[in-house]
Image (cartoon, helix red, strand yellow):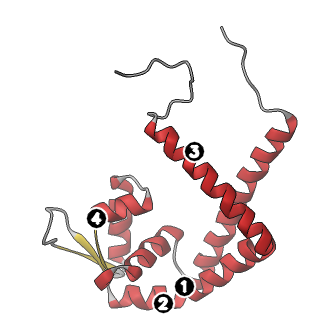
Amino acid sequence: MAAETWLDDIQQETWRSYLTMVRELERHLRQHLQHECGMSVPEYELLARLSEAPGQRLPVATLVESTGWEPSRLSHQLTRTGKRGLISRVPSPHTRYPDVVLTEEGFTLIARAAPRHVEAVQSLFLEPLGQEGRSALDAITRKILSGLDAHQADNCSLRTDAPQEE
C-alpha cells in the first residue's frame, strides 16, 4: 500500500486560507445582496444571465450549463423566482423544454441591483488586490481551470497509474 500523502504546513495554510476567503467573500456578497437589494445570490445570477441574453430569454439547457447547477436545483430556483414574478417560462420554438424570459419586474430588480453588486465586488474583492494582484489572480485562475478541464477530460482521475480505457 502506498504511503498516504498529506499537505505540508504551508500548503495546508494556503488551502485553508483560500477556503476561508471564498466562504467569507460569498457570505458578505450574499448578505449585501439580501440587505441592499432584497434578493438571493442565485436569483441575482439567474436574472443577470437573462438580462444579458438576446431578448432577455434563454433555454433551460443553456441556464443549466452556464450556472453549473443540477437541473433539479435550477427547476426549484425557476419556481421560486417565477413566484416572485421576476421570470416566466414560455414554450421554446426549438425544444420540448421551456425557455426562461426575464419579466419587466425582473429587469427592474436586476437593473437596480447590478450597480450595487458591482460596487460590492469591486470594494470587497477587486480593489484589495490592486492591478498587479488581479493580473496574478487571473493567471492563477486560468491555470487551475485549465487543469480542471484536463481532469474532467481524464474522467476525473488523479491517478497516474490508473488503467487506461481502450
Q: Left or right: 31 with respect to 129?
A: left
Q: Please report whichever mark, 2 or 4, sits nearer to the chain's N-terminal start.
A: 4
Q: Left or right: 50 with respect to 129?
A: left
Q: Please report whichever mark, 1 or 3, sits nearer to the chain's N-terminal start.
A: 1
| Cβ atoms at labels 3 and 2 below 8 Å apart | no
Residue 52 % position (x, y): 41, 81
Determine whether 15 is above or below 67 in the image: above
The Cα–Cα distance between marks 1 and 2, rounded to whole angstroms, is 6 Å
The Cα–Cα distance between marks 2 and 4, rounded to whole angstroms, is 22 Å
Check residue 114 in the rendering and tell me which mark sits there, or answer none.
Answer: 1
Instruction: Evaluate whether residue 102 shows in this view.
Output: no
| Cβ atoms at labels 3 and 4 below 8 Å apart | no
Residue type at numbered disc 4 = Val
The Cα–Cα distance between marks 3 and 4, rounded to whole angstroms, is 28 Å
The Cα–Cα distance between marks 3 and 2, rounded to whole angstroms, is 36 Å
**Residue at label 3?**
147
Residue type at numbered disc 1 = Ala
**Residue at label 4?**
60
Q: Which residue is painted at 62% across and 82% down in the image?
A: 118
The Cα–Cα distance between marks 1 and 3, rounded to whole angstroms, is 31 Å
| Cβ atoms at labels 1 and 2 below 8 Å apart | yes
The extreme top residue here reads 1
Instruction: Evaluate whether residue 131 shows in this view.
Output: yes
Residue type at numbered disc 3 = Gly
Q: Nearer the viewer, residue 144 or 78?
A: 144
Determine whether 157 is above or below 39 in the image: above
Q: Secondary structure at mark 3?
A: helix
**Residue at label 2?**
111
Q: Left or right: 24 with respect to 83?
A: right
Q: Secondary structure at mark 4?
A: helix
Q: Secondary structure at mark 1?
A: helix
